[in-house]
Image (tube, helix red, strand yellow):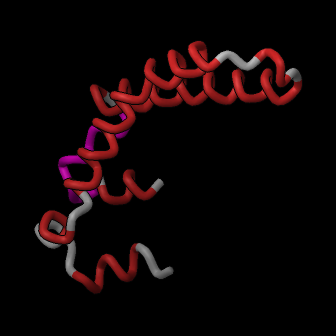
Amino acid sequence: MIFLILAQKMPEFEHETSGAHVEEHEAIHEGMGRYSAYLAKCKSSPSSFNAEEFRKILQSWGPILFYHLDAEVISLSHANLRRYYTLAEVKELFPW
């Protein structure tokens, strides 16, 4: 939701509904789904835990997650935000 609001002025987030950004989100969500399913399986049957399998699940989506988060940190930096929004506008968008 926040990124859709920011996309109104920030070209970095215009791709929230298409393109590479969405592909990254899909890959992250797929990885999180595999991660969650594996944890649920291990919770119901602790003896089924296999460290190598767990590591493979994390490695399958970890690189795209960290790439994506690094890019968002840069896009959300104060230096970049002030190019598009005044402090008053940011406070209005995010009153908490």
- Give percent across and percent down for residue 1: 47, 54
In percent of the image, x 50 and y 80: which residue is there? 96
Pick the residue in front: 23 or 11: 23
Pick the residue in front: 66 or 81: 66
Q: Residue furthest right?
A: 44
Q: Is residue 95 shown left or right of residue 38?
A: left
- Give percent across and percent down for residue 61: 44, 24
Q: Is residue 42 shown left or right of residue 50?
A: right
In percent of the image, x 31 and y 58: which residue is there? 6
Residue 18 included in the magenta stretch of the image: no
Total labels: the figure holds: 0
Q: Is residue 83 above or below residue 60?
A: below
Residue 19, quarter of picture = top left
Q: Residue furthest bottom?
A: 88
- Give percent across and percent down for residue 51: 61, 20
In percent of the image, x 42 and y 58: which residue is there? 2
In percent of the image, x 46 and y 26: which residue is there? 26
- Give percent across and percent down for residue 92: 39, 81
Q: Is residue 59 above or below residue 32?
A: above
Residue 38, quarter of picture = top right
Q: Is residue 70 shown left or right of residue 52?
A: left
Pick the residue in front: 42 or 9: 42
Q: Is residue 78 above or below residue 21?
A: below
- State the predominant SS element of the stretch in magenta: helix
Q: Is residue 96 above or below residue 36?
A: below
Q: Is residue 76 shown left or right of residue 36?
A: left
- Start and end of the magenta stretch? 8-17
